[in-house]
């Protein structure tokens, strides 16, 4: 195996496997590591494990869905981050650039404000994320004759600001003793209440978003060229860009609909992936997915184990991610872009 | 003799300055601030929702507006015409939504605030008072001193008789509770989990203002184990590890979910059917807002936490409370609505 392939596959896979294993055996409810494995094996085999029922519930209904959600959400955020950074030819871009998080926030806080059940809040968040990006894309298509990437970014900034104002408005109107804390916690991100239903509900959107990314992985590289150069090579850049934006948005919207706003992963993980796998998107994408999933599972394990109360994910991803990012900036200069 | 009285009056007026023509006196509020207030305030502005509740209970005639507009669900539980008073917004704390000019246009002669009395709130009160020129009295809203708060504010507003009746109601409920739990050692008292938010995973930590009623009724908050704090999110796994005897849900969606979701099925409270919904009309019985609305929570919690030989007549107590504090006669239908999910099924 070549050194490059080793870096691109073995390191992330080994990290991911280790994180998943540790994450499944630790938690606030005491279940021995042996019991955890026995419970999972028994459930997979469709039989009852010889352990206390509550322990089985904890592992199968609480911990496993949560780890799966961390894996999916982290992978989705990192994957769409890698796509957006390539599309916009800019390493400072994160999946929020076109307003998907802002749109999802408006959807979710509206749901909380109207005291809707959790499923409806998640649905509104998902719809809000897609809706925001659809508006941005429509503006980008309408403003012809300018640099299309620049128009998209500027439209994203403007729509994001507008939606941010909507969130603030809802916060002002919300019940300060009842709804406001719930809104604050949602905006900080958490997987605390993840159920199996939540995980299953986002799988279709995530698969649907990943398929075009995988199919278009070679052409994705061409989008990092200038539009004119890419067209000279026979690539229809405008349509290709829209398809990839739609795919990446689908991933992000699905992810944040169950996790709330989790920052930094979509910005940070693609950089780390690039330093391991190089700039080729076909190799970068799987590494970013694995690292993103592993990173969020690891952070979420800390979030639920550090204290009896949950530490919001948004705080941890930034508190761990930002210093690491700075270290990477200084130490790994040669791997940039 | 007459002449002397007259001279004394003039001297007094000069000493107190021009404001004294409007009949004022000086009170010291819970933060230790000396505030010059009118002898008989007529137009009082509540600075926040807990103050709204207190003011409405004690002297609805002197109220000039609600800090938060009553919702259509709340209105049937509030008396006309007060329930249709304008909304003035919050003037307290950092989340200020009141428009100071509008507040001034309403010409209040006193601003009443109830809640935390730390240095931040004391300085905020000073700032508002300085800016508006309207006396701003901040009263400690801790649940444990509810009877004192009622009597203090009753005297301030010139309605000592109403305040006395309400204070006696609160004291009676507490003493009834104390008799009930005197025989129950602390270790035998129920361990309670309070779940807020649609997913029920937001809870109040030890010493949180949200848990004051629970502490007052002598039950154990399972989240005390997580240390002191205010509101926090916890994981389902953590709640399963705590295994509470009783769950109190703030949100009906959470109560329904708990009953159905297999994840919660093994919790002692769910197994024994001891999951209760905290009534919240017109104001919360448990924690929202943190005002005197929680007084009815004492009898309610007594009846669900310590179901003993002689059950509390909750319906009768509710009627008394709503008549005394909210100035309405509860209908049978309203009693049933309030208690839906809030007590053990008969």
Image: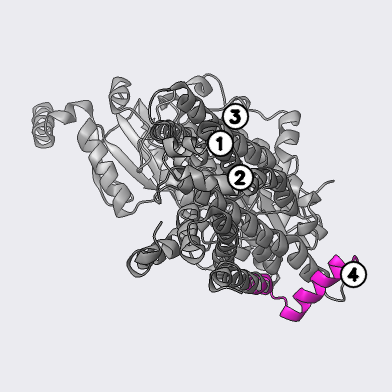
For this rendering, which residue is in front, B192 or B13? B192
User: The residue tagged with tag 4: helix, strand or loop?
Assistant: loop
- Residue B119 appears anywhere in the view: yes
User: The residue tagged with tag 3: helix, strand or loop?
Assistant: loop
Q: Residue at x 67, y 59 (%)?
A: A66
Give the distance between the C-alpha atoms of the residues marked 3 and 2, in whole angstroms: 56 Å
Where in the figure is residue B101, as x and y percent of width and height? 28, 24
The tag on residue A216 is: 2
Q: Chain of mark 4?
A: A
Give the distance between the C-alpha atoms of the residues marked 3 and 4, in whole angstroms: 49 Å
- Residue B183 appears anywhere in the view: no
Report whether B304 appears left or right of A330: right
Where in the figure is residue A219, as x and y percent of width and height? 56, 44
Q: Residue at x 25, y 32 (%)?
A: B134
The residue singled out by tag 4 in the image is: A48
Image quadrant holding the C terminus of chain A, namely: bottom left
Q: Within 10 angstroms of label 3, few (less than 14), some, or many (20 or more) residues?
A: some
The residue singled out by tag 1 in the image is: A240
Give the distance between the C-alpha atoms of the residues marked 4 and 2, in whole angstroms: 44 Å
Report whether A27 appears left or right of A105: right
Where in the figure is residue B25, as x and y percent of width and height? 24, 37
Q: Chain of mark 3?
A: B
- Report if the CB atoms under discs 2 and 1 are less than 8 Å apart: yes
Report whether A312 appears left or right of B296: left
Q: How many marks?
A: 4
User: The residue tagged with tag 2: helix, strand or loop?
Assistant: loop
Q: Are marks 3 and 2 on the same chain?
A: no
Query: Disc 3 or disc 2, which is closer to the eye?
Result: 2
The tag on residue B74 is: 3
Q: Main secondary structure of the magenta part?
A: helix
Q: Is residue A180 magenta?
A: no
**Segment colored magenta:** A21-47
């Amino acid at each position: 195996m070549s050194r490059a392939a080793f870096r691109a596959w073995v390191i992330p896979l080994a990290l991911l496997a280790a994180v998943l294993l540790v994450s499944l055996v630790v938690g606030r409810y005491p279940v021995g590591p042996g019991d955890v494995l026995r419970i999972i094996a028994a459930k997979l085999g469709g039989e009852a494990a010889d352990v206390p029922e509550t322990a089985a519930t904890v592992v199968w209904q609480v911990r496993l869905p949560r780890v799966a959600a961390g894996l999916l959400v982290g992978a989705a955020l990192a994957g769409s981050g890698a796509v957006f950074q390539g599309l916009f030819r800019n390493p400072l871009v994160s999946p929020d650039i076109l307003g998907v998080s802002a749109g999802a926030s408006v959807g979710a806080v509206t749901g909380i404000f109207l005291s809707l059940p959790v499923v409806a809040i998640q649905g509104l968040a998902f719809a809000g994320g897609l809706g925001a990006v659809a508006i941005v894309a429509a503006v980008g298509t309408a403003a012809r004759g300018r640099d299309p990437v620049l128009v998209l970014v500027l439209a994203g900034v403007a729509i994001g600001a507008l939606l941010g104002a909507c969130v603030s408005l809802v916060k002002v109107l919300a019940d300060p003793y009842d709804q406001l804390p719930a809104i604050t916690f949602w905006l900080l991100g958490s997987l605390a209440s993840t159920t199996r239903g939540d995980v299953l509900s986002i799988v279709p959107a995530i698969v649907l978003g990943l398929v075009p990314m995988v199919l278009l992985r070679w052409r994705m590289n061409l989008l990092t060229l200038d539009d004119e150069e890419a067209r000279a090579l026979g690539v229809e850049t405008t349509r290709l860009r829209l398809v990839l934006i739609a795919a990446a948005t689908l991933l992000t919207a699905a992810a944040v609909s169950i996790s709330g706003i989790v920052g930094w992963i979509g910005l940070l993980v693609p950089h780390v992936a690039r330093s391991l796998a190089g700039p080729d998107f076909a190799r970068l994408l799987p590494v970013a997915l694995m690292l993103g999933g592993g990173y969020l599972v690891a952070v979420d394990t800390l979030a639920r184990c550090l204290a009896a109360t949950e530490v919001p994910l948004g705080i941890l991803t930034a508190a761990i991610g930002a210093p690491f990012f700075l270290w990477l900036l200084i130490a790994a200069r040669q791997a940039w872009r | 003799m007459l002449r002397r009285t007259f001279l004394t009056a003039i001297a007094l007026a000069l000493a107190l300055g021009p404001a004294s023509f409007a009949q004022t006196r000086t009170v010291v509020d819970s933060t230790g601030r000396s505030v010059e207030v009118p002898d008989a305030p007529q137009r009082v502005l509540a600075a926040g929702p807990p103050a709204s509740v207190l003011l409405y209970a004690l002297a609805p005639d002197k109220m000039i507006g609600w800090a938060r507009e009553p919702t259509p669900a709340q209105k049937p539980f509030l008396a006309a015409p007060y329930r249709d008073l304008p909304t003035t917004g919050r003037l307290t704390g950092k989340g200020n939504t009141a428009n100071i000019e509008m507040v001034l246009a309403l010409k209040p002669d006193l601003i009443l605030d109830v809640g935390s009395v730390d240095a931040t709130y004391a300085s905020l009160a000073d700032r508002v008072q300085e800016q508006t020129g309207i006396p701003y009295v901040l009263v400690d809203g801790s649940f444990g001193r509810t009877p004192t708060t009622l009597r203090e504010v009753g005297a301030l507003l010139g309605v000592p008789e109403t305040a006395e009746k309400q204070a006696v109601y609160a004291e009676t409920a507490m003493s009834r509770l104390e008799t009930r739990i005197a025989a129950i050692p602390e270790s035998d008292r129920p361990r309670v989990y309070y779940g807020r938010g649609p997913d029920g995973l937001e809870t109040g930590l030890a010493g949180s203002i949200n848990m004051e009623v629970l502490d007052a009724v002598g039950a154990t908050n399972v989240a005390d184990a997580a240390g002191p704090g205010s509101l926090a999110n916890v994981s389902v796994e953590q709640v399963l590890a705590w295994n509470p005897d009783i769950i109190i849900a703030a949100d009906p969606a959470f109560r329904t979910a708990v009953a159905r979701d297999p994840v919660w099925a093994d919790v002692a409270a769910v197994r024994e059917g001891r999951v209760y919904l905290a009534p919240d009309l017109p104001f919360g019985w448990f924690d929202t807002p943190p005002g005197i609305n929680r007084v009815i929570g004492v009898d309610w919690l007594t009846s669900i936490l310590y179901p003993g030989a002689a059950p509390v007549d909750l319906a009768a107590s509710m009627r008394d409370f709503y008549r005394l504090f909210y100035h309405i006669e509860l209908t049978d239908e309203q009693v049933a609505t309030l208690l839906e999910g809030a007590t053990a099924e008969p």
